[in-house]
Amino acid sequence: MIIAKLDRLARNVHFVSGLMEADVDFVALDMPQANRLTIHIIAGMAEHEAEAISILTRDALAAAKARGAKLGGDRGNFA
């Protein structure tokens, strides 16, 4: 498997580890020299980043809602 960026393979350490344990060969074009340790570290950082983005987004939406902002788009009400 060829991937463009190692951190985009998955943002889940368990998934990436499962691929490695299943002997799935993959090469990241942004880091072709990556070894097993590097792959685990990058996957861990990507997972952490995804969790942080989720928390920030949830908090920002809650703050906007508290200010009275209307969240979401038109849900099919074309009147």
Image: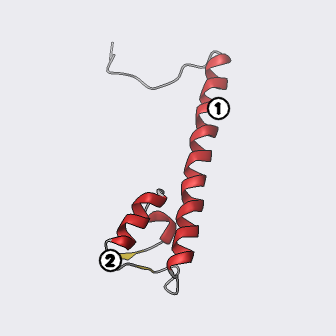
Indicate the amino acid at tag 2: Asp
Q: Which residue is mark 1?
A: 60
Question: How far apart are the two marked residues, 2 and 1, measured between alpha carbons?
Answer: 41 Å
- Tell which tag, 2 or 1, sits nearer the viewer: 2
Indicate the amino acid at tag 1: Ala
Q: Position of residue 37 (x, y in %)?
A: 55, 76
Q: Quadrant of residue 60?
A: top right
Name the residue located 52 percent from the left edge and 87 percent from the top edge.
Answer: 33
Label 2 neighbourhood size at 10 Å, few (<14), some (14-19), many (20+)? few
First in sequence, mark 2 or 1: give its number.
2
Label 1: which secondary element: helix
Q: Which residue is mark 2?
A: 23
Label 2: which secondary element: loop
Q: Position of residue 38 (x, y in %)?
A: 56, 76
Name the residue located 32 percent from the left edge and 77 percent from the top edge.
Answer: 23
Would you say the residues marked 2 and 1 are in contact, meaning their CB atoms lie under 8 Å apart? no
Question: In this rendering, would 56 be left or right of 17?
Answer: right
